[in-house]
Image: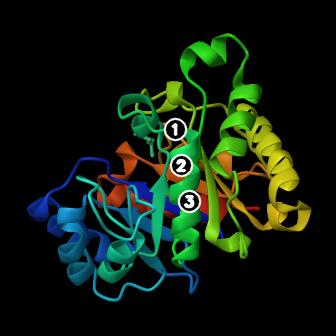
């Protein structure tokens, strides 16, 4: 399966910085002929980024969240249709920062995911345990429960449009990535749990990304693991050169 490397810019890069990034990135990025990279910018930079990246083959743009309703009284939200109209191909859903700081529940994640898939977007659904849960050895239970809750009643017709991101909260922005062994163990249990939800064949075709302090120097050892199919990248995606190096090293190390 084609690996996937997605930049989550979080609340970073307004117009000027997005433009600067795209002129550097356009000069560096080489498509493999498959779409294997994505950027989720702040929405105010979306259009500019789209124009300045031109028709860069192999790269898609997406949102950092998406709502399940078509429109209405939902201050601060954006619908699937509105994202798609901008040219978005995917949406990140249930990121731990949304779960932790903005009260995002599994139930809301499931509604967002169902709407994204029904509207033709790829849904990147995030799961992951906190440091406290990790220390209490609750990772397996937390991740299985989040996955079940986040995909409850979600119809997955095409497994290539569902992507799961395992992001241990203790590894996000800390410089302390999960070891490849930890990542593989959790990715394996995610695939197993997924098989119970969407069927074994679909689970085998679903990409599972790792996120949390990935960088060009540590992506290869992660990508060598059988169930690691790419990365969701925060800090290392903010510089064109480091994001591109991470993509290249990740591609080269993919099984
Ligand atoms: P870092 O790569 O900065 O640890 O962030 C990971 C993340 O949260 C991506 O969604």
Is residue 191 rendered to the left or right of residue 23?
right
Q: Which of the marked residues, 1 or 3, is nearer the chain's N terminus?
A: 1
Of helix, strand and loop, which one carries label 3? helix
In front of the other: 74 or 65: 74
Spot occupied by residue 220 in the image (x, y as percentages of width and height) = 63, 50
Numbered mark located on residue 109 in the image: 2
Q: Which residue is mark 1?
A: 105
Q: Are marks 1 and 2 in contact (CB under 8 Å)?
A: yes
Name the residue rendered at 32%, 68% in the picture.
Answer: 71
Q: Give neighbour class at mark 3: few <14, some 14-19, many 20+ (Cα, 10 Å).
A: many
Furthest residue in direction front, as rendered: 73
The residues tagged by marks 2 and 3 sit, at their Cα atoms, a distance apart of: 6 Å
Q: Which residue is mark 3?
A: 113
Vertically, is 34 above or below 111?
A: below
Left or right of 46: which side holds 136? right
User: What is the x, y in percent for residue 97?
Assistant: 40, 36
Query: Which of the image's four quarters has the C terminus?
Result: bottom right
């Amino acid at each position: 399966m084609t690996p996937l490397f997605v930049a989550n810019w979080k609340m970073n890069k307004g117009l000027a910085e997005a433009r600067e990034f795209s002129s550097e990135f356009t000069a560096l990025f080489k498509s493999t002929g498959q779409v294997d990279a994505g950027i989720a910018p702040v929405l105010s930079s979306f259009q500019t980024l789209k124009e300045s990246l031109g028709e860069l083959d192999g790269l898609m743009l997406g949102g950092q969240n998406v709502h399940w309703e078509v429109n209405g009284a939902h201050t601060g939200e954006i619908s699937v249709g509105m994202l798609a109209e901008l040219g978005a191909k995917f949406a990140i859903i249930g990121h731990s920062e949304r779960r932790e700081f903005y009260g995002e529940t599994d139930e809301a994640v499931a509604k967002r995911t169902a709407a994204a898939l029904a509207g033709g977007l790829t849904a990147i659904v995030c799961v992951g345990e906190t440091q406290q849960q990790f220390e209490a050895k609750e990772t397996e239970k937390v991740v299985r429960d989040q996955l079940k809750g986040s995909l409850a009643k979600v119809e997955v017709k095409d497994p290539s449009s569902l992507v799961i991101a395992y992001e241990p909260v203790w590894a996000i922005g800390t410089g302390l990535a999960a070891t490849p062994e930890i990542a593989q163990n959790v990715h394996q249990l995610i695939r197993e749990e997924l098989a119970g939800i969407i069927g074994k064949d679909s689970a085998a075709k679903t990409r599972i990304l790792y996120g949390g302090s990935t960088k060009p120097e540590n992506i290869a050892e992660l990508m060598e693991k059988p169930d690691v199919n790419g990365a969701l990248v925060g800090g290392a995606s903010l510089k064109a050169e480091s994001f591109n190096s991470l993509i290249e090293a990740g591609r080269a190390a993919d099984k």
